[in-house]
Image: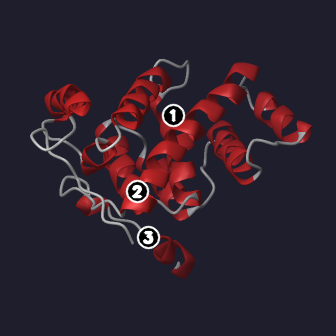
Amino acid sequence: MTDFSTHTIETAPQASKPLLEGAKTAYGFVPNLLGTMAEAPSLLEGYMTLAGIFDKTDLSETERQIILMTNNRLNGCVYCMAAHTTISQMAGVDAGVIEALRNNTPIADAKLEALRQFAVVINETRGWPSQTAVEALIAAGYSRQTVLEVVLGTSLKVMSNYTNHIAETDVDSAFAPNTWSAEQVAAA
C-alpha cells in the first residue's frame, strides 16, 4: 500500500498550513486525519468547510453525531468512530446513544432511532431511499430539510472515512481510549 504522510504544520503543503494552524488553535493539536488530508489542500479545505456547514444545520449535536457515527460504523472507519465517540462524549451526547451507535443497536428514543435508521438507508442505498423510508423519517417528526441534511452528513463522512481507509490514519492519543472495531461489534 502507498504510504501517506501525516503532515505537521511545518511539513504540510503551503496551502494547507493555515488550515492546520486553525485546527491546532481550535483543538489544541492537529488531528491525524487533518494532517493526512493536508497532502491535498483542496480536500482539507473542503472537509473543514463542509464540517462547519454541517454544524449550522437545524440538527442538534446528538442528531448530527447520529448521522456521522452511523456512517462511520457502516463504512468501518476505526479512526472516525474513536474520534466521534470522544467528540460526542465531550459534547454531552447521552451515553446510551453513543453505545447504540458504536454497537449497532436501537436507540431508546424513537425519533432519534428513526434518524439512525434513515442514515443507514441513505448509506446502504447510496442515496436511493424508498418513499416509505422518507415518509417514516418525516412521520417521526423530521422534515424534508432533514432528509437532505442526512445527505450532507453522509457526504462529510465519505471524505473522512475514505481518506482514513486509503491512508490507514493512526488514531490520535486523544481518541485512543475510544478505539473501536467492526470485529468487536460482530463478536458482541
Q: Dot 3 corresponds to which residue? A: 181
Query: Residue 88 appears in which quarter of the rendering?
Result: top left
Q: Position of residue 40 (x, y in %)?
A: 35, 40
Instruction: Name the foreground residue: 140 vs 125.
Output: 125
The location of residue 145, given as percent across then percent down, is: 69, 20
Residue receiving disc 1: 64
Q: Secondary structure at mark 1?
A: helix
Proximity of marks 2 and 1: CB atoms separated by less than 8 Å = no
Q: Residue 12's x, y, as percent?
A: 19, 41
* Residue under the point 37% across and 51% down: 85
Residue 176 pos. (x, y %): 24, 61
Point out the tag, 2 or 1, that comes first from the N-terminus: 1
> Does residue 96 appear in the picture of this structure?
no
Select label 2 or label 1 by which is in front.
2
Q: Amino acid at mark 3?
A: Ser
Residue at the farthest left position: 10
**Front of the two marks 3 and 2:** 2
The residue lying at 65 percent from left, 34 percent from top is: 151
Nearer the N terminus, badge 3 or badge 2?
A: 2
Seen from the viewer's position, the closer of residues 101 and 37 is 37
Dot 3: within a 10 Å radius of its alpha carbon, few (fewer than 14), some, or many (20 or more) residues? some
Mark 3 secondary-structure assignment: loop
Q: Is residue 175 left or right of residue 45?
A: left
- SS state under label 2: helix
Mark 2, residue position: 164
For the residues labelled 3 and 1, the Cα–Cα distance comes to 21 Å
The colour scheme applied to this rendered structure is: secondary structure
Q: Amino acid at mark 2?
A: Asn
Amino acid at pointer 1: Arg
- What residue is drawn where x is 62% and y is 39%? 112
* Mark 1 crowdedness (10 Å alpha carbons): few <14, some 14-19, many ≥20: many
Residue 11 lies in quadrant: top left
